[in-house]
Amino acid sequence: MRPLSFQAVRSLAAGLAAAALTGGALAAPAAAAPVHAPGPVTEQGGSGQGARLHTNTELARELKRIEHASHGRVRVRSIGTSNQGRPIWYATLGTGPTRLMYVTQQHGNEPLGTESALLALRSLGLGDDRESRALRSKITLGIVVRANPDGHHHGWRYNYDPGADPEYGEPGKGYDINRYHDPAVAPDDNPATEAAVIQRQYAAFRPSIMVDYHMQGRYAFPPPDGREITTSILWPTNDDVSAGALRAAKQVGVRVHDAFTGAGAVVSQYPGGSYEGIARNAYGLRGSASLLVELSALPQERENFQIRSAAISMVDLARAAASGALAGIDPARADAIPPRGPSLPGGSAAAARGAAPAHDAAD
Ligand SMILES: [Zn+2]
């Protein structure tokens, strides 16, 4: 099966995504426009050109709205609470044997993947046509939607833990959740609350595919190409990941690369490290086809493109998993994806949104 074109996904979503993408009726019905809570996170209601981000309160409301509209096909529940007591939402759909798990926004100031997840849930969960039903009979998809609600609220990368003096994170602020997935650390011993929540959910669900959505700064391919990179991806790079899990992760990577490219994205490899606490490595070590996706912090007028392309990748991967197409992919194609080029001058200006750390910490 070829990766979905943008038009195909638009069709699949029956216009739902398009409405949401324009900041329109689905995300914020005119009759019940959400009130933006004041806070450090910049929320845009339609006056600006950037994407409209859901506050934590709005996210909960939108997930319930999707669940209701799906007539039981999308199930939403809290799988734990953040250090400040906010629910960590988990949405599932499908009843099939092939299990996929997506995680968004472990880093609180990398918000776009969460918006993509809402579109993907609508696209995959609401249709009652034969194709949609067939897809949901072949896969079960679980999405941790905004793993770090406290970080989102505060507009920062870490969780909220003022008592923390972490090996990875910032003293007095919190832990870097995406350094605390080491399979050797049991959830009960994990100092990063939200990482433990993900660990437990992973263990209960045992997905064969695990994709973790983040954001990075701005980069371009070196001349003469010169194109700005919109998306970077990477599979596990820890030496102890089995050959089979690495092969499967690269097959997922190729498929995700093709879906993004088909949507108009410019994709590179991501230069990530081998530390086993990073989700990309940790869930590869546990045997899943594990992939990192990094959306570049493009200018605000391109945020909706970023959201849409990532949603397409989420939907397309579910379809590929359902059809068995992944097994036919040559994993060596992943290695041929070009490396990330240099940082763009002023690329950290995108961090004005709070979207990416200026120092561009990895993964
Ligand atoms: Zn990140």
Image (tube, rainbow, N blue to C red):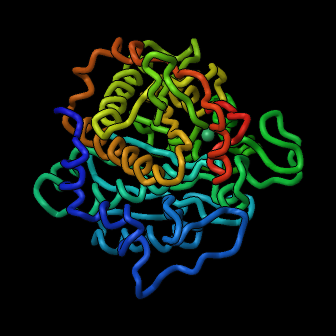
Q: In which quarter of the image is residue 44?
A: bottom right
Residue 98 against residue 327 in the figure, above or below: below
Q: Where is residue 205 in the image (x, y as percent from the top left)?
A: 45, 44
| Nearest to the observer: residue 224 or residue 75 | 224
Locate the C terminus and report the quarter of the image it occupies: top right
Q: Residue furthest left?
A: 130
Q: Position of residue 77 (x, y in %)?
A: 48, 64
Q: Can residue 97 be seen in this view?
A: no
| Nearest to the observer: residue 127 or residue 338 | 338
- Residue 112 shown left or right of residue 108 in the figure: left
Q: In which quarter of the image is residue 182?
A: top right
- Residue 256 shown left or right of residue 161 in the figure: left
User: Which quadrant contains ligand 1?
Assistant: top right
Instruction: Report the label total.
Output: 0
Q: Where is residue 188 in the image (x, y as percent from the top left)?
A: 71, 45
Identified at 51% across, 18% down, the residue is 222
Residue 234 against residue 321 in the figure, above or below: above
Q: Is residue 63 visible?
A: yes
Identified at 72% across, 51% down, the residue is 156
Q: Position of residue 312 (x, y in %)?
A: 32, 45
Q: In which quarter of the image is residue 1?
A: top left
Q: Which residue lies furthest to the bottom in this view?
A: 31
